[in-house]
Image (cartoon, rainbow, N blue to C red):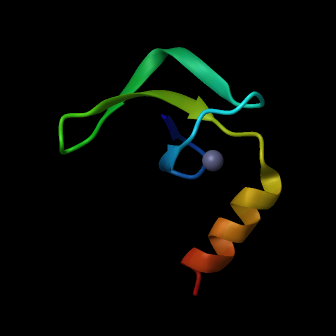
Amino acid sequence: MYYCINCQMLHEKSSSVRIFLTGFMTLPSHEKFPLGMCQCESNHAALKAVSNG
Ligand SMILES: [Zn+2]
């Protein structure tokens, strides 16, 4: 798992994801995940549509 800075949520790692080597996100539950940026534009569009209601 990694924390996507585009979506501001956790994603499963995939072959197309770019993981940053120097950044980490620590959750309130004290779990620590590497920062990444997913490449799925359609996924972002879908997420925005959902979050906008
Ligand atoms: Zn994402």
Q: Horizontal and vertical percent for residue 1?
A: 49, 34
Q: Name the residue at 26% across, 41% down.
A: 27
In this rendering, would 45 be left or right of 32? right
> Residue 32, relative to residue 40: is it above or below?
above
Q: Horizontal and vertical percent for residue 37?
A: 64, 35
**Quarter occupied by residue 46:** bottom right
Q: Name the residue at 18% across, 43% down.
A: 29
Q: Residue furthest right?
A: 42
**Quarter occupied by residue 39:** top right
Image quadrant in which the C terminus is located? bottom right
Q: Horizontal and vertical percent for residue 22?
A: 47, 12
**Is 4 in front, or is 14?**
14
Q: Residue furthest bottom?
A: 53
Q: Name the residue at 49% across, 29% down.
A: 35
Q: Name the residue at 68% across, 39% down.
A: 38
**Is 36 in front, or is 11?**
11
